[in-house]
Image (cartoon, rainbow, N blue to C red):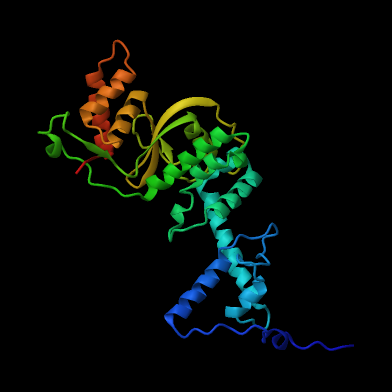
Amino acid sequence: MKRLRPLSSRRSTSQFPLRKVDSRADLLELQRAMAGAIFRPLTSRWRMQSESADGQGSRAVAAEFIKPNDRLSSFERLEIYNRQYWFRLLDCLYEDYPGLRAVLGERKFLKLAIAYLTRYPSDSFALRDLGSRLEQFLREEPLWSAPREALALDMARFEWAQVVAFDALARPPITTDEILDTPPAELRLHIQPYVSLLALRYAVDHFLIALKKGSTDGLRGEASNAVEPAPKASGATKRVRLPGRADICLAVHRHDNQLYFKRLEPEAFAILSGLQRGLTVEKACAEAVSSFERSQIDWAAKIKEWFQNWAALGWLSLAK
C-alpha cells in the first residue's frame, strides 16, 4: 500500500510566495486584501467563493498572505473568517427584525438579508447601523418582500426605529425657564433624535407585541404613559395573525433606558412633524389644526395637554 506523506509536509509549503510587509503601505495593502476576501458574499452552500472580486482564484489570493498549517490550507483558513463574518451579520439582522421575519417567513427573510447585504455591505464600525438602508433597499427592490411589500416596509421602518430609539443621541430636554418668555410665534423646539415619528398603513405595533409576547424583549406599548411590566416568557410559540390595514401614527422612543411606542392622534403627529421640520410652535399647531379641523373640540386645551405630555417624556429640546 502506498504511504501518504504527513499532512504537515503536504500543506506546509505553498506554490505561492507570501507577501512581504516592510512598510505601512504594505500593511495597508495586506489589510485591504484580507478585508476584500472576508467581505465577499458566500456561495449558496455557505462556502467562500472560488474567485475573488477581480477574477483571481481565491486559493491563490489566500496563499499570498495566509500560511497553511498541518490541518488547513490557506484557502480553508481564510474561509473560516469569511463564513464567520457573514454569519455574524446575518445573525444581527435576524435578531433586529423578528417582525419582518414573521411577515416574510424564515426562508424568504434569509434570502432578503443576503441580497440586502450584497447590495449594501456593512460600512460602519457599529453593528447597530447594519439595517440603516433596509427601508431604502425594500423600496428599490420590492420583489424580495412580494406579495407583502407594504406590510414589510412598515415593519422594517418600525423595527429600525427601535434601533434608533435604543442608542441615538439625546439632547438636554427643555425646562420651563427656557421657554417662559418666548412667544409661540418665535419658539422653535427640536424633537429628540431618538424619537421616530412614523405614519404607517398597518398596525405593526400590536402585531409585534403579540409576536414578542412570552419573550423578555423590552418594547412596550403605552395607553397613557404607564409603565407596564415586561411580558413573561412562555414555553410555546404561537402563530400570530398578520395585521390588517389600519392607518396609524406612532412615536417610537425610549424612557428610563427602556424602549416604548406610543400611538398619536393625527393632529398631534402633525404638530410633532412640523416641529421636526423646523416650524415654530405656533406655525406647527396652526397647520395641524387647519388640516384636521373638527367641531366641538377645545384645541387650546388639547394642545396644552399634548405639550405637557411630550415635555414630561423628554421629547422636546430647545432649538439653538
| Residue 202 percent coordinates (x, y) | 51, 29
Q: Quadrant of the C terminus?
A: top left
Describe residue 178's horizontal placement relative to residue 85 as left or right.
left
Residue lying farthest top? Answer: 296
Q: Quadrant of the N terminus?
A: bottom right
Describe residue 72's horizontal placement relative to residue 186 as left or right.
right
Nearest to the observer: residue 42 or residue 54:
54
Q: Residue at x 22, y 25 (%)?
A: 304
Nearest to the observer: residue 238 or residue 154:
154
| Residue 160 percent coordinates (x, y) | 45, 44
One can see residue 231 in this view: no
Picture layout, residue 266 above or below residue 252: above
Picture layout, residue 234 above or below residue 265: below
Q: Residue at x 61, y 82 (%)?
A: 67
Picture layout, residue 10 above or below residue 123: below
| Residue 104 percent coordinates (x, y) | 61, 40
One can see residue 98 in this view: yes
Q: Quadrant of residue 185?
A: top left
Q: Quadrant of residue 285?
A: top left
